[in-house]
Amino acid sequence: MDRYVTGAVIRRLRESKKLTQEELAGRLYVSGKTVSKWETGQGLPDISLLEPLAKALDISVIELLSGADVRNRNLSSNMLRGRFYVCPVCGNVLYGVGEAVVSCCGITLPPLETEEPDEDHRIRAEAVEDEYYVTVDHPMTKTHHISFLAALSDNGLQLVKLYPEGGAEARFKRSRVRRLYACCNHHGLFELKPRR
């Protein structure tokens, strides 16, 4: 774990819940003085208190440790508002419909930000019958490659995980596709909105 909950985070979250130090202490079976020490940086909560503390503050333990109160505001589950997350350790690819706190291999993953494709990451989409044949003219070495290609529609995600020494190409059903993505393991996520 590279971070630990700070007193400023506890205080901010406690105050946002409109709890006094004594009220929070009562929920955790500790003294008000103990909560005061946490908030002033004179002590830290014991690891056994992290789960009850997170529950009392109505957030997850990961959010508590990261200091962020993440709430998914995409309550309609609009697929086009989702976010990609990629683990730099194992290469795991995750897609969340809206904001989330995502963790893999002990790391809290930031959502990938999309970029316009540059010359080295140009996404080509050829319509072939009911499919898109998607390619990226990019080196595919162990150290530098396109890690996945994806097609996103308003009702789902199609994803093809790619591996070094293979080609940066995939086929996707065209039905309702609104966006195509290519993820470079060095330069991030690139997006193309195909013509209909």
Image (tube, rainbow, N blue to C red):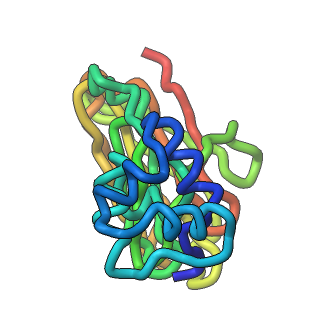
Single out the residue that lies furthest toward the right: 119
Give how far across and how far down residue 152 sits, in percent.
Answer: 36, 35
Q: Nearer the viewer, residue 24 or 160?
A: 24
Vertical position of residue 180 compared to residue 53: above or below = above
Q: Position of residue 108 (x, y in %)?
A: 49, 66
Depth check: 179 or 103 in front? Answer: 103
Residue furthest toward the top?
196
Picture coordinates of residue 171, whole percent (x, y): 32, 47
Question: 183 or 131, which is in the foreground?
Answer: 183
The residue that appears at 29% across and 35% down in the rendered structure is 131
Answer whether residue 169 is visible to the viewer in this image.
no
On screen, 110 above or below 38?
A: above
Q: Relative to 184, is 126 on the left or the right?
A: left
Look at 57% across and 84% down and name the residue there: 142
Which quadrant would residue 28 be assigned to in this image? Answer: bottom left
Q: Can the viewer see residue 165? A: yes
Asked if residue 144 lies left or right of residue 55, the reply is right
Q: Quadrant of the C terminus?
A: top left
Q: Relative to 121, does residue 32 appear above or below in the rendering?
A: below
Query: Which residue is at 42% across, 63% downward?
Result: 62
Report the number of numbered marks.
0
The residue drawn where x is 29% and y is 29% is 174
User: Could you tell me residue 163's position as x and y percent?
Assistant: 43, 75
State left or right for residue 2 relative to residue 173.
right
